[in-house]
Image (cartoon, rainbow, N blue to C red):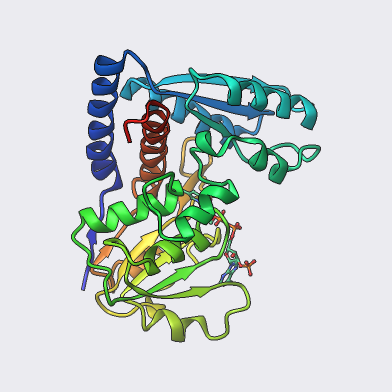
Amino acid sequence: MSANLINGNEISKAVNAETAAEVAEIVAKYGVRPALAVILVGEDPASQVYVSRKDKKCAELGIRSEKIVLPADTTEAELLAIIAKLNADPSIHGILVQSPVPKQIDEQKVVLAIDPAKDVDCFHPFNVGRMMLGDFSGFLPCTPWGVTVLLERSGVVTRGKNAVVLGRSNIVGKPMAAMLAAKAPFGDATVTVCHSHTRDLAAVTLQADIIVAALGIPRFLKGDQVKEGAVIIDVGINRIPDPTAKNGCRLVGDVDFDSVVEKASLITPVPGGVGPMTIAMLMKNTLRACRAALKTA
Ligand code: NDP
C-alpha cells in the first residue's frame, strides 16, 4: 500500500477561514476584536520564527496581535509583572509566552501566572484538568486538538480503534492520549502511550490502527514497525543537516516517511502536516477566550 497524504495546509486553511468568519462576526456584532498577546523572551531563532508566524496568522484572520519582545536577561519578576498587567487588561483575550524561556525563568511559574481565562496554550492546570475531566468546551491543547481535527476531516474514525501515542510530554503526548481515549466524537479509541522505557516498541506499534509520533527523534518510526493500512500522524519537527539545501538544513519528522508511506493508508507530511494545525487551533482558542469574555460562548 502507498499512502494518501493528509494535507495539513489545506485543512488548516479551512479551519482558519471558519475562524476569520467568526472573528468578523464578533467585530460586527460587539465591536470587539479578539486579541492575543505573544511574549518572546530572548533571541532563540526557532522561537522568533514561531512568534512571527503566530503574529502573521493573527493579522490574516483579523485577530489583534500584541507582540512583546523582551531581552534574554529579563528577570522572572519582570516577566511575571508583564503577565499580571496583561491579565488585568480587558482588551487582551489570550496570552502566550513562547517556550523555551531563558534559564533564569521558571517556566512552571509562568504557566501558573497566566489567568486560566486567557491561557490559550492550554497549559494551566485548571484548563488541563478541565479537559481531562471531559469538558471540551474550554481551551484545548493546540497540537493534540489539531491532530484530532486532521483525523476527523480526513474521515478517520477513532472509535474502537487501537491508537498508539509515541511520547508522553505535557504539551503533546499526554493530552493527545487523553483526547484519543476521551468519550467524545474524536476519541473512544483504545490508547497505548509509549516512552523511553517502553520495551519492544515495535510489538506495540504493529498493533496500532493509528499512530501519533511525538518524540523529537528524526525519522524514528520505520516502515517495519507499522501495520499495513495504519494512519500515521507525525508531530515531529526536527532540523537536520542537508548540504543540498539553501540554508544547509531541512525539516524532517519523527517518522521515516519513505519507508512508512509504503505501509500506511494515510500519513501527514513534515512540513505541511501537523504544524499549520497547531497555529490554527491557537487562533480558535483565542476566539474561545474572546467569546467567553463576551459571555457569548
Ligand atoms: P519532549 O522531548 O518533551 O518529549 C519526547 C517524548 O518522547 C518523551 O516522552 C520521551 O520519553 C519520548 N521518547 C524519547 N525517546 C524515546 C524512545 N526511544 N522511544 C519511545 N519514546 C521516546 O518532546 P515534545 O512532545 O515537546 O515534542 C515532540 C516532537 O514534536 C518534537 O520534534 C517537537 O519539535 C515536535 N512538536 C511539534 C509541534 C507541532 O506543532 N507540529 C508542537 C510541539 C512539538 P520519556 O518521557 O521517557 O523521556
Residue at 72% from the left image edge and 24% from the top image edge: 81
Residue 130 visible in rendering? yes
Residue 255 visible in rendering? no
| 123 versus 83 height, above or below | below
Residue at 40% from the left image edge and 33% from the top image edge: 292
Screen quadrant of the N terminus:
bottom left
Q: Given the current orientation, which residue lies at the most extreme front position?
A: 295
Residue 160 in percent (x, y) is at: 28, 77
| 93 versus 269 height, above or below | above
Pick whichever, 260 or 91, lies toward us: 91
Number of on-image labels:
0
180 relative to 92 in the view: left or right: left
Residue at 30% from the left image edge and 66% from the top image edge: 261
Please tell me in which quadrant of the rendered image residue 293 appears. top left
Screen quadrant of the C terminus:
top left
Residue 86 in percent (x, y) is at: 59, 22
Q: Given the current orientation, which residue lies at the most extreme left position?
A: 155
Pick whichever, 42 or 85, lies toward us: 85
Residue 262 in percent (x, y) is at: 28, 71
Residue 219 in percent (x, y) is at: 47, 63
Residue at 41% from the left image edge and 64% from the top image edge: 212
| 84 versus 175 height, above or below | above
Please tell me in which quadrant of the rendered image residue 188 appears. bottom left
Please tell me in which quadrant of the rendered image residue 155 appears. bottom left
Quarter of the displayed picture in which ligand 1 can be seen: bottom right
